Amino acid sequence: MLMASAIFVLIAVMILLTTRPAWSSEQIPCWKAKAFITYAGSVSEAEKLAEKHGYTRTQIAEVRRRCGL
């Protein structure tokens, strides 16, 4: 029973770590910005999608400048 509980806790921690929203100090990689644009179909929709993923407007503006989007 203890082993099953430990495995459950480890799985829960892994899920939380891999699905967390972005931190404000984190930069958006160029590949992720391009993927957002491709998935959303337009830059404005991609910005909305990035905001839903926890990125700030400042981060979005910075990645547009840095990656030439």
Image (cartoon, rainbow, N blue to C red):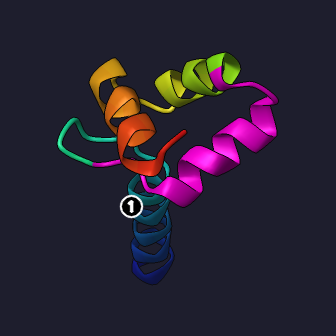
- Residue 30 position, x and y percent, is 49, 55
Quarter that holds the C terminus: top right
User: Three-letter amino acid code at disc 1?
Assistant: Val
Please report the residue visible at 44 percent of the width from the left and 83 percent of the height from the top. 3
As drawn, is 25 to the left or to the right of 58?
left
Please tell me whether residue 39 belongs to the stretch shown in magenta: yes
13 is higher (above) or lower (below) than 62: below
Please provide percent x and percent y for residue 48: 58, 18
- Total count of labels: 1
Magenta segment: 27-43
Q: Residue 14 lies in what quarter of the image? A: bottom left
- Asked whether, in this view, residue 10 is left or right of residue 24, the answer is right
The residue depicted at 36 percent of the width and 47 percent of the height is: 66
| Residue 26 in view, yes or no | yes
Q: Main secondary structure of the magenta part?
A: helix
Residue 67 placed where, x, y %? 45, 49
Q: In the figure, is residue 7 to the left or right of 36?
A: left
Residue at coordinates 35% horizontally, 19% vertically from top-left?
57
Q: Is residue 2 magenta?
A: no
Q: Position of residue 47 (x, y in %)?
A: 56, 23
* Residue 34 to residue 14: above or below: above
Determine whether 49 is above or below 23 in the image. above
Q: Nearer the viewer, residue 63 or 65?
A: 65
Residue found at the far bottom of this picture: 3
Toward the viewer: 23 or 28?
28
Q: To which residue does mark 1 refer?
A: 13
Residue at 68 percent across and 49 percent down: it is 35
Other-residue count near label 1 (Cα within 10 Å), few / some / many at <14 / 14–19 / ≥20: few
Viewer can see residue 21? no
For label 1, the SS is helix
In the rendered structure, the answer to whether residue 46 lies left or right of residue 57 reads: right
